[in-house]
Image (cartoon, grey):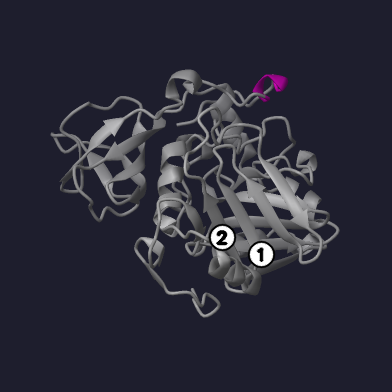
Amino acid sequence: MSTESIVIPVQTGHRGFTPENSARHGLTWLSAFALLEISGPDSERFLQGQLTCDMANLSAGQWTLGACCTAKGRMVANFVIARHGDHVWMRLPRAQVPALRQHLARYAVFFKVTMTEHPDDWLITASLPAVAASDNDSRSDERQLQHNSADNSLTLYWPDGRIEYWQPAAKASEQLQQAATLTDEYHWWQADLAEGIVWVEEASREAWVPQFIDWHVHGGISFRKGCYTGQEIVARLQYLGKSKKNLISVSSAEEADIRIMTPLQDSNGKTLGDIASWHGSSGLAVMNSDWPEQGVKAGEIPVTLARLSYTDSTTEQNNSDTTANAAAPAETND
């Protein structure tokens, strides 16, 4: 990761972009993320057969969430995805960009597409509101997108009031320099945790089917579209099985260095799940459905577990379009 294009006083480390005189809200740089661009006349057809989201119904004025799976339904990567014409952009953890490109390249040979990594020439900046919207969340359909024809930059609006800017590095640097208020990237990560958003990282690649991180609840899976790699496993779990794993909120009394995929164990040493995302003193975990209220540790660190805010209304909930499909393989997933 290069910081050469960012000319304001800045540090990047385990808390991400950390400007001087940081506020709790304002503009930040999502230094932990980068863009993968897929362009060409076959881009929609190619991606429709590889991703969990419905590319055919993704309009130019909206963005969505999606994932790319192996044939066994395990996620290679998940991402924010947007399109304009034959150009499709994915925003995902920086280390995941080359991995996703390499995975997709195996299927791209028969399509007229070009895949381009944008680690430094394009950057993602983002705006955090002073107060998050209380009547919407990341699972809403209100995911609006604006395209700037002058430089092909994109502006993405989250229902909770957050905004992302995908733009050339020089434009991003100028935007950061002129911003009235700057904030730590860490606050964006915390907002993701609050919304129940997990990003597949290098350590968790191919560890989970999408439902384990509630990707169906967040609209990252379409059950109306046709076949895609891993679709049989994902659909089987949705229609004929009950997921044995759930996404749970995790916290510690003090800030701790807890790595992704650190096992969570009960007082008897039984493994209950794994840390999926962690920042400071809070995170998310993929857990077995039954878990104790006390005595759980992440490694050697005592942690507290809690259900996510949307759990009551979405437990056992299928994606809103699942009822359109009545047919599914006659097996159950693990």
Residue at horizontal 80 percent and vertical 60 percent from the top: 110
Q: Quadrant of the C terminus?
A: top left
Residue to which mark 1 is pinned: 167
Magenta segment, which residues? 321-325
Residue at horizontal 61 percent and vertical 49 percent from the top: 80
Residue at horizontal 73 percent and vertical 56 percent from the top: 88
Q: Position of residue 61 (x, y in %)?
A: 77, 44
Dividing the picture into quarters, in which one does residue 175 lie?
bottom right
Name the residue type under label 1.
Answer: Gln
Magenta span main SS: helix
Task: Assess whether mark 1 and mark 2 are in contact (beta carbons under 8 angstroms).
Answer: yes
> Does 292 lie within the magenta span?
no
Circle 2 packing at 10 Å, graded few (<14), some (14-19), many (20+), is: many
Residue at horizontal 27 percent and vertical 47 percent from the top: 281
Name the residue type under label 2.
Answer: Thr
Dividing the picture into quarters, in which one does residue 15 lie?
bottom left
> Which of the two residues, 258 or 160, is positioned nearer the viewer here?
160
Query: Does residue 263 appear to the left or right of 253 in the view shown?
Result: right
SS state under label 2: strand
Query: Does residue 21 appear to the left or right of 102 in the view shown?
Result: left
Q: Position of residue 210 (x, y in %)?
A: 52, 39
Residue to which mark 2 is pinned: 125
SS state under label 1: strand
Residue 173 visible? The answer is yes
